[in-house]
Image (cartoon, rainbow, N blue to C red):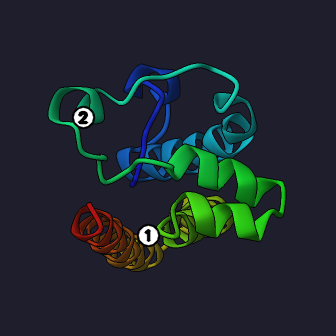
Amino acid sequence: MEIALFPRCLFRDMEEGRRRHLNYCVSAVVLVIAFRYLRLIPHVCLFRWMLGIPCPGCGITTALAALCGFDFRGTMHANIAALPIALLLGFQILVRPFAICSSSSNVGAWIDRCSRFMNFCASFSLCVVWITKLSRL
């Protein structure tokens, strides 16, 4: 879930570590802003269309858009795995600037470790929700 939307050349004057932290932070901000509008775009789940079963991420966009609108019931109904994903995005937005501004590489390394752990938790929750959905079919 460490999503880097922007090409490396956009931040070419920065050192690699700071560039990566900035890309993750700005990408998370862009995604949070986009969630409210992504629901308006019609989409087709190719996984469901081809296999006839929901994909692990089915409902995530709807759930995150509902969460941005403080609709917790809608979030739970769409996909509860959106909560750890939202925490991970919040972490990227709130904590990555510390790694950008810090002169110590230890801060960046600690933030990377925390982010990887949160990424694992979010991925694990997606798998648990998916298995639960599949068991109900």
Q: Mark 2 or mark 1: which is in front?
A: 2
User: Residue, x 64% and y 30% (percent of image)?
Assistant: 38
User: Residue, x 40% and y 75% (percent of image)?
Assistant: 118
Comparing 104 with 123, the one in front is: 123
Q: Position of residue 102 (x, y in %)?
A: 58, 68
Secondary structure under the numbered disc 1 in the rendered image: helix
Identify the image quadrant of the C terminus.
bottom left
Relative to 2, say whether 61 is above or below.
above
Tell me how far mark 2 sits from mark 1, CA to CA. 36 Å
Q: Amino acid at mark 2?
A: Phe
Res. 78 image quadrant: bottom right
Mark 2, residue position: 47
Residue 74 located left or right of residue 137: right
Comparing 7 with 122, the one in front is: 122
Relative to 19, say whether 76 is above or below.
below
Q: Amino acid at mark 1?
A: Gly
User: Residue, x 36% and y 45% (percent of image)?
Assistant: 16
Residue 132 located left or right of residue 12: left
The circle drawn on residue 136 is none
- Chain-order first, disc 2 or disc 1: 2
Mark 2: give few (<14), some (14-19) or many (20+) Cα within 10 Å: some
Identify the image quadrant of the N terminus.
bottom left
Residue 104 in view in this figure:
yes
Mark 1, residue position: 108
Q: Position of residue 88 (x, y in %)?
A: 52, 67
Q: Position of residue 84 (x, y in %)?
A: 50, 72
Comparing 88 with 7, the one in front is: 88
